[in-house]
């Protein structure tokens, strides 16, 4: 069993930064891909960034210049550093993980087996 717990969300003004964390516990060492998704009510959840266990990463176009995904295997945690946040990026940010990994593409949410409960990010103008 795998448990993912996100933290670090909150309220920030436009242009500000937040660092999200996702701590994994349980049998997570076979989870070769971990990623961040975001969603709002009535809108399909979208991929933000993904990181493979070897450190390779991939980002959505909107995230490439402002967001950084990283992982600390010693702490069983991945992070998402978000800079220059925009009001339209207000959403619930969720961590996901799966055994299968294709780092060349951001796979859809349905491809991920394990999910955290999410952490709310609110960006005010």
Image (cartoon, grey):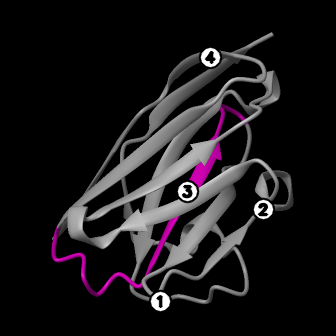
The span from disc 2 to disc 4 (Cα, nearest Å) is: 22 Å
The span from disc 3 to disc 2 (Cα, nearest Å) is: 10 Å
Residue in the picture at 84% in, 52% down = 62
The span from disc 4 to disc 1 (Cα, nearest Å) is: 34 Å
61 relative position to 30: left or right = right
Residue in the picture at 36% in, 52% down = 22
User: To which residue does mark 1 refer?
Assistant: 100
Q: Foreground: 81 or 10?
A: 81
The span from disc 2 to disc 1 (Cα, nearest Å) is: 19 Å
Label 4 crowding class (10 Å Cα cut-off): few <14, some 14-19, many 20+? Answer: some
34 relative position to 103: left or right = left
Mark 2 secondary-structure assignment: loop
User: To which residue does mark 2 refer?
Assistant: 60
Q: Using the rendered view, name the quadrant where residue 76 is placed.
A: bottom left
Instruction: Give the mark, 2 or 4, whose residue is nearer the N terminus.
Output: 4
Task: Point out the image quarter for the N terminus.
Answer: bottom left
Q: Indicate whether 67 appears above or below 43.
A: below
User: To which residue does mark 4 refer?
Assistant: 12
Label 2 crowding class (10 Å Cα cut-off): few <14, some 14-19, many 20+? Answer: some
User: To which residue does mark 3 refer?
Assistant: 36
Residue in the picture at 42% in, 83% down = 53
Instruction: Give the mark, 4 or 3, whose residue is nearer the N terminus.
Output: 4
Q: Are marks 2 and 4 in contact (CB under 8 Å)?
A: no
Q: Using the rendered view, name the quadrant where residue 95 is placed.
A: bottom left
98 relative position to 45: left or right = left
Does the magenta segment cover residue 10? no
The span from disc 3 to disc 1 (Cα, nearest Å) is: 15 Å
Instruction: Give the mark, 3 or 2, whose residue is nearer the N terminus.
Output: 3
């Amino acid at each position: 069993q795998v448990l993912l717990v996100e933290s670090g969300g909150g309220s920030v003004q436009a242009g500000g930064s937040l660092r999200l964390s996702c701590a994994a516990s349980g049998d997570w060492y076979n989870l070769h891909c971990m990623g961040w998704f975001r969603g709002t009510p009535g809108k399909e959840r979208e991929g933000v960034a993904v990181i493979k266990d070897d450190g390779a990463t991939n980002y959505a176009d909107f995230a490439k210049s402002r967001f950084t995904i990283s992982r600390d295997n010693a702490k069983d945690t991945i992070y998402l550093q978000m800079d220059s946040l925009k009001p339209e990026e207000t959403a619930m940010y969720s961590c996901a993980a799966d055994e299968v990994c294709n780092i060349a593409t951001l796979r859809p949410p349905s491809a991920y087996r394990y999910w955290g409960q999410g952490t709310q990010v609110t960006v005010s103008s």
